[in-house]
Image (tube, rainbow, N blue to C red):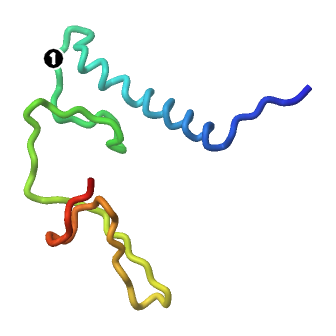
Amino acid sequence: ARAFSLPPRLLVDLCLVILIGSLSSPVIINLLQLGGSHQVMNRSFDSFRLVNTYGAFGSVGKARFEPIISVSVNGSDWIELELPCKPGKVERKPCF
């Protein structure tokens, strides 16, 4: 008999679906207003802020935090990588 095995990519995908699904349960309970409570808006439901809820009129702050990825060949000269859809140079055309 041959043992059943999942391809590694499918296994990782299934783990991510299970993780996000389990982390999303408080958000779904909040949206459905189960337990007679009122909806909480603009709140994160886990310490890693992977899943959260936004109200219909969410707020946008003036500060924008974005990752900057730099690489170096020799450890002293660094080159910042431009990611294709990340906000960056104003002169660059939008990513679609």
Query: Is 85 placed left or right of 15 in the picture?
Result: left
The image quarter containing residue 70 is bottom left
The image quarter containing residue 31 is top left
* Residue 64: % across, % down: 17, 59
Three-letter amino acid code of the residue under disc 1? His
Residue 85 sits above or below residue 40 on the image:
below
Query: Is 39 placed left or right of 52 in the picture?
Result: left
* Residue 18: % across, % down: 51, 30
Q: Residues within 10 Å of mark 1 (few under 14, many from 20)?
A: few
Residue at image location 15% in from the left, 72% down from the top:
91
* Residue 34: % across, % down: 26, 11
**Residue closest to the eye, 15 or 48:** 15
Residue at image location 22% in from the left, 14% down from the top:
33
Residue 20 sits above or below residue 25 on the image:
below
| Residue at the disc numbered 1 | 38
**Residue closest to the eye, 91 or 55:** 91
* Residue 74: % across, % down: 49, 90
Residue 3 sits above or below residue 94 on the image:
above
